[in-house]
Image (spheres, helix red, strand yellow):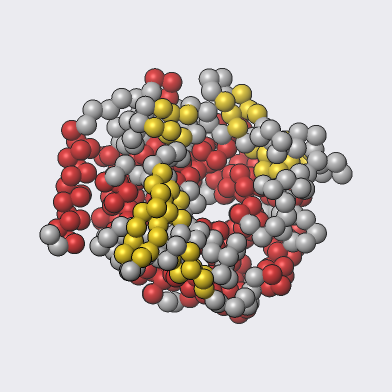
Amino acid sequence: MTKKMIHLFCWVTLLAVSLLSCSKKNAANKVVTPPPDTSMVNFAHLNHLYTPVSFPDGTTAAGVYIYSNYPGYVNTDATGEGFTCVDDVSRAALVYLRSNTYATDTAVRNKLYNLIGFLLEMQSPNGYFYNFLQTDGQINMYGPTSINDPTWWSWRAFMALTEAAPAIKSLNPALYTKMNTAILNLVAKLKIDLVGLAETTTTVSGVAIPTWLPAGSATDQSAVLILGLINYCNANSDPVMTGFVKSLADGILLMQQPDTTHFPYGAFLSYQNTWHAYGNVQAYALMQAGNFLNNPQYNKAALAEVDNFYPWLLQNGFQSAFTIGVSAGAVQTLSDTPYAQIAYNIEPMVFAAAEAYKETGQAGYADMAGHLAAWFLGANAANTAMYSISTGVCFDGISSPTSVNQNSGAESTIEALLTLQKVEAYPAIDAALKKYKK
């Protein structure tokens, strides 16, 4: 059977399954179908998580509670870490920034300003960011998930600040000035710590991996950093950081499994010889890098994952993680983890498929993006609506085909809203989601 025939068979099978399978919705999260002109994006639960915060120096800002527990959705903290964090606040800021009412709704804008204020307070003197704020108003400076290192929360803060800055510049010049200072401080630190590292490789279980990315080979972190850097470079003439975008993109390319006809079908590994679904934004970031650098090689590589790996995930009920080894040129699966499946697994793929549709105009990508996003509305292993249009609650994850975590914390809520904002930006993707939802 040829590769083209295999793909055709997979998509026909998927369509048949979607038409024949019976759905079962969790009564506690039953979707209330809105009128056709009503948005699926409901800020109600995110607004419930949003909370004012005060720092010891008297500065006031806002955060979002990390956890909110079923059945009453009582907001709570992460024991030993804090109650709100840069990881979540950065992404919540993007939800408000990307709202279609941002330009006219002062409440939405003020929430964004307050969240940005939180990020600014969490930047440390070395340019990186602390992650967690504790309930007593003290910054958690020493926890392993909070220290001011070159890692996830610093990149997310950078991405949020650089994307929001142009929109805030004329509306709130004083805040913009503080944001720009924070951005420049982080860029200066990057030029010391990461820019210009030797582009060498090492081998893990037979897999060649780069050593010059954040954490050595973290393509997931690199992808988030690329998105922030492109924002920064579009606002600043900085050939050094433009070159850094290329260096990071080249590292991501090295982590792609090149055989698109055998598992893992052109997937970008996340770290060393491991792929995980959460934060797997490499394909989307590479398309952005290809456009920014005018290098179609990156777009082509990204589409190879979208064209070959995403259909496999849909056909096989998604996946949480796997590790591989390479021996005599053959890929072997060393471990395979189907669960937990979470909102943050789905959002990156929807963004990549939507970007592929935007760039190519090919209807198949819109169909794929909608099919992936339908995970939120019941097209998943548990046949359960994970997101409620009527409440804005998004369940925290699927643990097995018969077990759903009905808590609804910040990450789940935010990732669902970001996904649905992207879906509604394209009528063809919106229509596909509604076709595949259960």
So how many labels did they put on this image?
A: 0
> Is the C terminus in the top left, top right, bottom left or bottom right quadrant?
top left
Quadrant in the rendering for residue 32: top left
Quadrant in the rendering for residue 308: bottom left
Residue at position x 41%, y 27% from top?
Answer: 403
Residue 72 x/y as whole percent: 56, 20
Residue at position x 76%, y 47% from top?
Answer: 142
Residue 60 x/y as whole percent: 78, 41
Q: Is residue 129 above or below residue 379?
A: below
> Is the N terminus in the top left, top right, bottom left or bottom right quadrant?
bottom left
Residue at position x 80%, y 34% from top?
Answer: 136
Residue 104 x/y as whole percent: 57, 45
Residue at position x 74%, y 61% from top?
Answer: 127
Q: Judge from the rendering whether residue 250 lies leftward or rightward of residue 243; answer left or right.
A: left
Is residue 284 something that shows in the picture?
no
Q: Is residue 158 above or below residue 248?
A: above
Q: Is residue 427 above or below residue 407?
A: below
